[in-house]
């Protein structure tokens, strides 16, 4: 009879638990924690920062709500998380797609749950986001702020991990037939912010978001009436009504590339438009290449 | 060099009176002259000490005579009204703010004795909109220029003060952009708003609020008057709170109302002399405003003693809560004990049934403390 060997199931378990409510937390502890959370919310005894980031609400409500979507529905795989610095500021630049910016939310979960340092992702959002009631205030509580150079530089200087989607509405609202082709990368404002603060740029490619709401049409008149940049028509929306709001369960891959250092250029380099254009193109090319690589890796859209 | 003769306008209000009283206590200052259109209350008059009160309207050229005969060298302009309610309507308010400032500046320009001008301005000049950067520094301007009300007046006033300082470059001009005042004694738009037991707010919006304790406001004004800082400086406490958080910390009830309805509610409450929901005030309550106070701490040389949260809790002493936090704590603690008991019963039942050992539940609530 061969000798029995004890193989540790979790060799690296040194007692450090991830924030997700682990299944071994008994139900009564969970309820007690929930009551404690309720007490804090009712008495206002929690902290928010100058951008309106509410860590208490994010950790106990917003992230837990997004987690099932992240792990069950889209089965997100995170690659190259070691390329994201464990401390200090960095600018994560990603492609934008999916009609509704779910990709930003999923990347936030990925960086919090899959990064060893559980980094908080500070998103830069379009002004439309902050114009909308409920959405705007929730976005601020989730750690987002307006995409402007002042806020980006302030966050980077405070050693935060800042997320930007330079394609903006051109990326999220592009028709399905143009999937996985990057749009113009804004005016390179993100490169200027990184150069001024000397923080690295981490290119990030997101595959899978394109298929959640395949946009086959755009009701332009309706969009203009509602003051939106586009009004999506998908195979299920608005034909199936609220049922059309359920995203298709595509398989997602999020990959972080090697950081592009900017510190050696010096802050004055932000005034050199040629360098800014070149760096913008370099970041864009890197992301486009890794999108192609990830697409080859993915065997089918839904698995 | 400390000032010899100081003139304070708007001395009958709390902050103006407190500043005059503070300056009157300083033996290095020869004379303190307080100006206002209404006489100070008997209680304030007692505190004013050796301050000489002159009942004058700054909209009237007579203010020039006061400045020249007393050889005033430092003028502190605080007679700026932030709500129409306090000055009898929007028309008189604008008159007092803009025309009053113009008259005062005209008088200062003629008076060779004036060496220093301190303006109590406001961070409302940055406006409040969804397109604002999160934090304003002194060099930034409003993204959406305020179109009316107090903020527009303040912008105009700052403009006149800037042109005054161009014409009289020998005068040191300090422009203090204050955030919202709070404290047990001061009366501001915000304190009136937060004193209501049920606070109506705009549904779906939550403003970031930065507060300044009244003692710090006084400290900054006194330092600006006696010191030599020239330029513009943001004045606010450290840290911010969300409006919902402020309401909860004060034990008030929040009533979210759709913003169009809030406008008519505002007109209704204003008629009865309650809180003012001017369009400008509503924009502030939707988006809020935060200013960077690096210049205050480094160049101006004053670090506020109260943070935003501390200033609020000091104010809370004077505003008895509608929902006491102890009650909330009591109820949740009791519920937690109940759950813990139920949990231990369930686990002991589980142990006997399955014969499987399960660790006793740890002290409840520990799990949630980690992030605090």
Image (tube, rainbow, N blue to C red):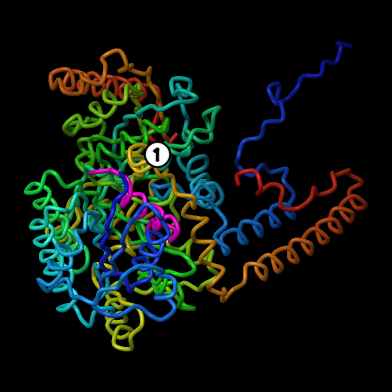
From where the camera sits, is residue A114 visible? yes
Q: Is residue B306 magenta?
A: no
Q: Place residue A95 in its image quadrant.
A: top left
Residue at image position (44%, 47%) is A49
Out of A140 and B288, give the one closest to the viewer: B288
Residue at image position (82%, 15%) is A5
From where the camera sits, is residue A225 visible? no
Vertical position of residue B82 compared to residue B218: above or below: below
The extreme top residue here reads A2
Vertical position of residue A220 compared to residue A202: above or below: below
User: Secondary structure under badge 1?
Assistant: strand
- With A222 as the anchor, is A240 left or right in this view? right
- With B85 as the anchor, is A59 left or right in this view? right
Query: Split into 4 quadrants, where in the image is the C terminus of chain A?
Result: top left
Q: Chain of mark 1?
A: A
Residue labelled with disc 1:
A122
Vertical position of residue B360 compared to residue B315: above or below: above
Position of residue B357 measured from the top left corner of the image (x, y, whole percent): 88, 43
Out of B255 and A293, give the one closest to the viewer: B255
- With A33 as the anchor, is B257 left or right in this view? left
Vertical position of residue A80 compared to residue B49: above or below: above
Q: Which residues are magenta?
A: B206-230
Query: Split into 4 quadrants, where in the image is the N terminus of chain A?
Result: top right
**Circle 1 crowding by C-alpha within 10 Å: few under 14, some 14–19, many from 20:** many
Position of residue B175 measured from the top left corner of the image (x, y, whole percent): 24, 51
Out of A29 and A254, give the one closest to the viewer: A29
Residue at image position (35%, 64%) is B20
Q: Place residue A42 in its image quadrant.
A: bottom right
Q: Is residue B207 magenta?
A: yes
Position of residue A220 measured from the top left corner of the image (x, y, whole percent): 13, 55
Position of residue B32 measured from the top left corner of the image (x, y, whole percent): 31, 63
């Amino acid at each position: 009879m061969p000798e029995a060997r004890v193989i540790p199931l979790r060799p690296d378990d040194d007692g450090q638990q991830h924030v997700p409510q682990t299944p071994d937390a008994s139900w009564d502890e969970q309820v007690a924690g929930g009551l404690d959370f309720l007490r804090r919310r009712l008495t206002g005894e929690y902290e928010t920062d100058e951008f309106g980031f509410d860590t208490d609400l994010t950790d106990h409500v917003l992230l837990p709500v997004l987690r099932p979507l992240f792990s069950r529905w889209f089965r997100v795989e995170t690659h190259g998380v070691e390329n994201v610095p464990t401390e200090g500021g960095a600018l994560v630049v990603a492609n934008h797609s999916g009609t509704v910016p779910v990709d930003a939310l999923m990347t936030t979960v990925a960086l919090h749950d899959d990064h060893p340092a559980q980094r908080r992702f500070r998103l830069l959002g379009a002004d439309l986001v902050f114009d909308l009631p409920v959405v705007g205030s929730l976005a601020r509580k989730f750690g987002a702020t307006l995409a402007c150079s002042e806020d980006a530089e302030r966050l980077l200087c405070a050693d935060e991990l800042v997320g930007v989607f330079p394609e903006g509405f051109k990326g999220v609202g592009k028709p399905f037939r143009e999937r996985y082709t990057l749009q113009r990368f804004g005016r390179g404002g993100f490169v200027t912010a990184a150069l001024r603060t000397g923080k690295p740029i981490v290119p990030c490619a997101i595959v899978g978001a394109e298929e959640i709401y395949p946009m086959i049409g755009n009701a332009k008149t309706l969009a203009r009436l509602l003051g939106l940049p586009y009004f999506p028509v998908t195979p299920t929306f608005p034909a199936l009504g609220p049922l059309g709001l359920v995203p298709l369960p595509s398989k997602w891959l999020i990959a972080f590339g090697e950081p592009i250092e900017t510190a050696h250029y010096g802050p004055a380099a932000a005034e050199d438009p040629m360098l800014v254009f070149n760096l913008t193109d370099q970041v864009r090319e890197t992301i486009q290449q890794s999108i192609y690589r990830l697409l080859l890796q993915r065997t089918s859209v839904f698995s | 060099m400390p000032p010899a003769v100081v003139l304070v306008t708007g001395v009958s209000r709390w902050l103006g009176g407190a500043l005059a009283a503070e300056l009157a206590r300083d033996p290095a200052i020869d004379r303190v002259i307080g100006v206002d259109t209404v006489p100070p209350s008997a209680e304030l008059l007692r505190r004013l000490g050796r301050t000489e009160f002159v009942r004058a309207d700054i909209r009237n050229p007579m203010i020039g005579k006061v400045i020249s005969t007393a050889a005033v060298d430092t003028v502190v302009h605080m007679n700026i009204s932030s709500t129409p309610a306090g000055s009898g309507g929007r028309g008189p308010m604008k008159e007092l703010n803009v025309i009053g400032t113009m008259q005062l500046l005209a008088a200062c320009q003629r008076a060779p004795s004036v060496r220093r001008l301190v303006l109590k301005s406001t961070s409302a000049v940055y406006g409040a909109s969804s397109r604002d950067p999160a934090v304003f520094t002194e060099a930034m301007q409003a993204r959406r220029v305020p179109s009316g009300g107090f903020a527009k007046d303040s912008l105009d006033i700052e403009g006149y003060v800037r042109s005054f300082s161009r014409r009289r470059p020998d005068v040191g001009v300090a422009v203090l952009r204050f955030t919202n005042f709070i404290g047990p004694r001061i009366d501001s738009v915000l304190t009136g708003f937060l004193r209501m037991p049920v606070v109506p707010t705009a549904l779906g919006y939550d403003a970031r609020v930065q507060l300044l304790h009244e003692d710090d406001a006084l400290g900054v004004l006194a330092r600006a008057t006696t010191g030599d800082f020239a330029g513009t400086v943001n004045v606010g406490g450290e840290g911010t709170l969300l409006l919902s958080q402020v309401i909860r910390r004060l034990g008030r009830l929040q009533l979210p109302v759709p913003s169009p309805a809030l406008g008519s509610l505002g007109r209704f409450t204003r008629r009865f002399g309650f809180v003012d929901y001017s369009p400008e005030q509503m924009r502030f309550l939707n988006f809020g405003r935060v200013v960077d106070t690096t210049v205050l701490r480094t160049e101006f040389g004053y670090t506020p003693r109260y943070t935003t949260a501390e200033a609020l809790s000091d104010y809370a002493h004077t505003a008895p809560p509608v929902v006491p936090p102890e009650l909330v704590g009591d109820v949740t603690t009791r519920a937690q004990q109940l759950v813990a008991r139920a949990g231990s019963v369930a686990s002991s039942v589980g142990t006997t049934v399955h014969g499987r050992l399960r660790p006793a539940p740890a002290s409840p609530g520990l799990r949630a403390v980690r992030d605090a």
